[in-house]
Every structure is written in structure tokens, then in C-alpha cells.
Image: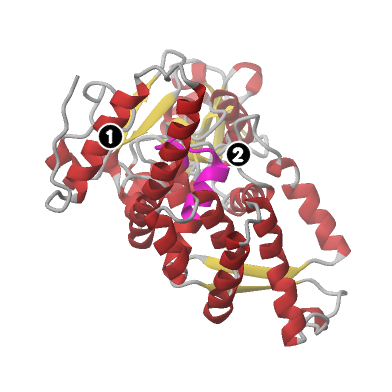
Amino acid sequence: MQSVTVELEAASTMELVNALSTIATELAQREAPESAAACLELTETLVAASDMQESALAGFIGRVDATGEQARWGYPSTQAWLRSRLGMRDSRAKERLTLARQRHRLPEVRAQLASGDLFYGYATTITDAVARLDDTDCAEAEATLLGFVDQGFSAGKVAAFGRRIRDLIADRDNTEDAPDEDTKRGYDKSWLTTTRSLDGGRYVKGWLNPEDAAIWDGTLAPLSKPAGPDDRRDLAERTAAALSSVLSGGHKASKVTVICDLDTLTGGNTPARLTDGTPIPAAQARRIALSAGVSPLLLGRGNTPLYLGYRERFASTAQRQVLETMYPSCAVRGCEVPGTLCEVDHVHGWALGRSPTDIDQLALTCGWHNRFKHTNPDQIQITKDQDGRYIYRLLPPADARATTGAGPPGSVGPPDSPALDWAA
């Protein structure tokens, strides 16, 4: 049994967290007391203590979120970090993130949660209710909702009152029925407006007429379906990922393509051909197959195009079908973006000429991790499993590895192979 001795006022935050972790480990290993009455009392005391810990946790998460620290560790968002690294359900990750982002606007909620005078459930209910209010209305809503808490209403009732707040504000400001500028545009023509955010993102708003809406639905609806029972994204997130997948497909500039069998390139006499059917003698095909501006399309069984060489930047439809079979989700361990919404990644960097567009040199990664791999090559460890799939593991930033010796999240032992210097 370990012993813990801490001078509370003199201890650092790290020392307090370590002490708390030691105590929690010991407590978790103990059997519950035989007395049910004692268990009831202990439960109430432990929940109150856990709620106060949530106050500290909100502060930690808020600092990570405000500085974007999670991106240095390979996570596209704070929510993805909470979900993937810490195993939180998506609903719990959203709940904690909202509390972390709103607590600075709710001084009374923050103080009462930290002192143990407000349950965590009430605190998150209030933060969710005020998330879309301006600062003035937020202050009034905080006082009103805390008043309902003091009157003994349940968290569910307080949540219902919170949902009514926006309706009351609209009624107060007489904006309930006022048409906005977008509505005045009419419904005959489609339109889109975009606004760049301070962090480099983009807000998109618009309207699609029935014809364009049908195209939207026909294109994105099949890609927006949940990837499976573990796909925790809501419809809005899946739709955004589907749109990004469609937009990232792009159009390929036309190049000369020589179509040939593997036997032709290895000395056989079977003629090659151009895409218009023009035959090319095998010897000539071998001479020009890797010339600048020429893309050799190597046929597999059943004339399925699998090997496109260095000049072809984009994977073929047949290759993508194979990859989606191999990669049900992004190749990055822990990333849950479905393979159908991922981008084809040249494992060792097509731009550097080290990874041709060949099926055994490709993997599927989500757009965010594809860019992260390109800009942070030292933070990706690449291995292959027994089925030939590439597995990308996130490594901590170099400064974190230097100070802590940390390895990839969830890994045991040294990397199987060093990370490579590539371009995606």
C-alpha cells in the first residue's frame, strides 16, 4: 500500500494531481463496505468530490483548447482528443468542452462548482443553455437558472427552462417574426456565402433550390451515413466530412497514359496501348513507360487498373474500392473518420517521387491527418499489420518526447520503424 503525504498549500498542481491519482487507484481496488447506509453516504461524498474535480478538469481542458495544444499531438480538435485519447463518449466530450469554454462567462457557476455548492449536472446544463447567448443575456440567464436550482428543480427541469430562454429573448426583442436578409433573397436561386474565421476555418451559409438540393442529397446522402455502430459523429459532422471528401476529389489534368500488362514491362511481347486504343509495341512501351509526362497504367487480373506509377497523382476508382475494403476508417490509430470519407494517402510521399500510385503504397487517411502527416512527419510512426494494412500511430511532439520520453499513445515498447521524412 502506498502512502501519500502532501502539504496542500505548498504543493504544485502536478503534485496534487499525482496524489489524487494515487488515492483514486487505492480506492478503486477496495471492496464496497457491507453497510448500504454507509455506501449511500460515501457515494454522496464521493460525487461531491468528483464534481469539484470537474471544475479543475474544465480549467485544464480550457487551457488546452484555447492554445490549440491538442493539434501538436496529432488531434484535429479538442473534442477528438477527449474522445480518442481519453476514451470519452462523444456526448461527454462535448459536455466537458462546453463547460470549459463557457466557465469564464459564468463566474457564479464556476465558483459554486469549485466550492462543491453546485452539482456538475446543473453546471453543464447551465453552460449548454447559455452557449449561444451574448454576454449580457448570459449573465441574466445565469442568475435566472441558478435561481431555479435554488428552488429545488431537477437538472432536467432547469434544462427545459434553458431551452426557453432564446424564445423569451426573441419575444423581448420583437425579433420572432422579423425576416432576416437571407430570407429576403427568395427561393428560386441557390446561393452560398462564406466567411473566414480568425482560426483559419470558414463559416458556410446558404440556400439550395429544389433542383440543386436534389443533387446535394444524391451526392452527399450516401456518404453521410454512419460508418457503423462506433461512428459517434452527428449528422452535421458526417455531412461536413462528406462534402470535404467530394471537394477534395478534384479533377485531373489530362496526361498521356500507356496501358500495359505487367508481362509487357518485364520483357513480354504483349503490345501496350494508348487510351484511344492505339497499339504500342512492347519494346517501345518499355522505353517510354516511365518518361516524363507519361503515366503507365499497369493492369491487374481482369484488366483492373492497380499500378499507375509516378506520373499519376490520383488513385483510380478500382484502387479506392480496394483501399476502402482494407481501411474501414482512417489509418491513424484511434481516428474514427470512416474510410469512405478519407483521402488516398501516398504513404512515402508522391511529391518526393518515393511513393508511386500503386496499391501497396497507398493508405486512407482523413483530410486533417493527411495534412498533419505532411507538416509533422516526425510525429507519425508507420507500421504494417499482418494483413498488409498500414497503421499510423501518433507520436508526442519532439519537446514532449525529450522531457518525458513518451511514446505513441497506447503503445508499448519502441516504435517498430522510424518515422520517415515524406510529403503527402
Where residue 358 appears, as percent x and y from the top left, is 47, 29
> What is the x, y in percent for residue 257?
55, 39
Q: Give, as a three-letter code, the residue at label 1.
A: Ser
Locate residue 354, reporting x and y percent. Answer: 33, 36
Look at the image and give the residue range highlighted in magenta.
83-97
Q: Tell me if I can see residue 17 in this picture.
A: yes
Q: What element carries label 2?
A: loop
Q: In which quarter of the image is the C terminus?
A: top left
Please report whichever mark, 2 or 1, sits nearer to the chain's N-terminal start. 1
Residue 96 magenta-highlighted: yes
The answer to whether any part of residue 424 appears in the image is no
Residue at 61% across / 16% down in the picture? 301
Query: What residue is pinned by disc 2?
Result: 232
Whether 376 is drawn above or below 260: the answer is: below
Q: Which amino acid does label 2 sit on?
A: Arg
Q: Who's the residue at 15% across and 53% down the image?
A: 9
Q: Compute the Cα span from label 2 to label 1.
A: 29 Å
Counting the numbered discs, the total is 2
Residue in the image at 67% along x and 37% along y:
226
For the residues bearing labels 2 and 1, Cβ distance under 8 angstroms: no
Q: Name the residue under label 1.
A: 21
Q: Say what secondary structure mark 1 lies in.
A: helix
* Secondary structure mostly seen in the magenta stretch: helix
